Amino acid sequence: MTVTERNALIAQYADGVREVEDALAGFPADALTAHPIPGKWSAREIVHHLGDSEPNGALRLRRLLAQEHAVLDGYDQEEWTRRLRYNERDHGPAMEAFRAARANTLPLLRSLGDADWMCTGWHTESGVYTVERWLGVYGVHAHGHAGQIRRLREALGAR
């Protein structure tokens, strides 16, 4: 990954919270738990996923940077959605956790030197995992979910 590519992904990472907030703006409050697209999460479930996934991702980054032979545990996000009752709980605190994880991690990303990007660990589901790979995943993560929220709103016929 070039420095230019890294910087573009860091900028996208920095913009992730705004992107999700924009996608949620105007989403009908009474439809946040709706599943208008069969087999897909509701808007509330997506926000809870971000609220859990982003702090987990921030910890993964820190492990890669600070631990030799870091092991990054995978998890079953569908089970988390069900067992942690994402659709039954207010998503406001999850949005705050997502926002805080990004705000805390962005300065760290911006401070990394060339050698930091090559720090390597092992992901239990994906194998060898570098800081660059982490950025490739999390740089676009929020934008992908913002797109899902927009598709849900469209499926509901909302503007």
Image (spheres, rainbow, N blue to C red):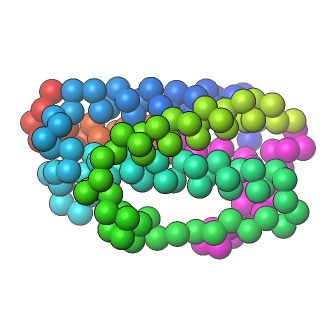
Q: Which quarter of the picture shows residue 72?
A: bottom right
Q: Nearer the viewer, residue 121 or 106?
A: 106
Quadrant for the C terminus in the image: top left
Q: Nearer the viewer, residue 111 or 93?
A: 93
Residue 139 counted in the magenta span = yes
**Along the horizontal axis of the image, is 114 left or right of 155?**
right
Residue 41 sits above or below residue 110 on the image: below
Q: The magenta stretch spans which residues? A: 114-140
Q: Nearer the viewer, residue 51 or 113?
A: 51
Q: How many marks?
A: 0
Q: Which quarter of the picture shows residue 35?
A: bottom left
Residue 54 counted in the magenta span = no
Residue 77 sits above or below residue 61 on the image: below
> What percent of the width, then of the height, locates residue 149?
29, 41
Q: Residue furthest left?
A: 157
**Along the horizontal axis of the image, is 104 left or right of 51?**
right
Query: Which residue sits at x=35%, y=26%?
Result: 22
Quadrant for the N terminus in the image: top right
Query: Which residue sits at x=58%, y=41%?
Result: 101
**Along the horizontal axis of the image, is 35 left or right of 21?**
left
Query: Which residue sits at x=75%, y=35%?
Result: 108
Visible residue check, residue 155: no
**Along the horizontal axis of the image, is 101 left or right of 89?**
right
> What percent of the width, then of the height, locates residue 113?
87, 36
Query: Which residue sits at x=74%, y=68%?
Result: 71
Visible residue check, residue 159: yes
